[in-house]
Image (cartoon, grey):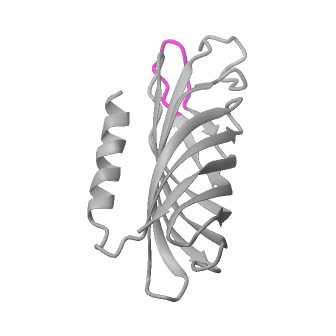
Amino acid sequence: MKKALTALAAFVLMTAAVPAGATGFAIFGSGWEPDAVDEALGGGISLSFPFGDSGLGMDFRGTFYRESNSGALVIDPDNAFPEFGLKIVPVDAALRYDFSQDGAVNLYLGGGASYLFLEVDQGPDLDDELGWLAFVGAEFGEPDGARFFLEGSYRSVTSTIRSDGDEIVDDVPIDLDGAMVNLGIVWRF
């Protein structure tokens, strides 16, 4: 919980630093399938703003994946480390290019950095990590006001479960690379 609150505070500070010309606020549901876990479902918010009329802009995002099923995560052959819940809170900063901000349909793509706050509900510590993400999406609706969007993304990051001497003898890397789908509503102002 402490890491989730830290992630939320970091996201609020990032969005507070955004210039007054911010033009988009979104809420969305997210499904992610990292390699190390079966699936992760969550929700998030984002704030985006353009760099003039060039189509180029910046996105700041925060997503919360409550409990991911770690059944696919194999740590050691003796199964000394039991199945556990994994909380994942990515905070992203990405460059974005909109192809038609003023059209009824806006296609966009982008990519940037992700900082993942990671926490397991039992067992040894898991390092927070820096990774990257890339996305492509489409917004549908009136240019000013509310629009629906659908987005496909890929996030890449590797973290490490630190040995604690009892259950795990060696540090264990876990691969959190995987595809995501985001679906939500964005408001333009």
Q: Is residue 105 above or below residue 183?
A: below
Tell whether position 118 is magenta. Answer: no
Instruction: Please indicate, yes or no, whether residue 71 appears anywhere in the rendered image.
Output: yes
- Magenta region, residue range: 161-171
Report x, y in % for residue 74: 70, 23
- Residue ID at (49%, 12%): 166
Residue at 65%, 62% (x, y): give it. 135
Number of labelled discs? Answer: 0
Residue 170 falls in which quadrant of the image?
top right
Q: Residue at x 58, y 67 (%)?
A: 111
Could you say which is closer to the camera, residue 69 or residue 58? 58
Residue 51 drawn at (x, y percent): 44, 83
**Residue nearest the observer in this picture, 126 or 132:** 132
Residue 91 visible in the displayed image: no
- Quarter of the image with the N terminus is top left
Query: Which residue lies at the image location 37% right of the left edge and 70% below the top edge?
Result: 22
Residue 115, above or below 106: above
Q: Quadrant of residue 172?
A: top right
Image side of residue 163 versus residue 149, left or right: left
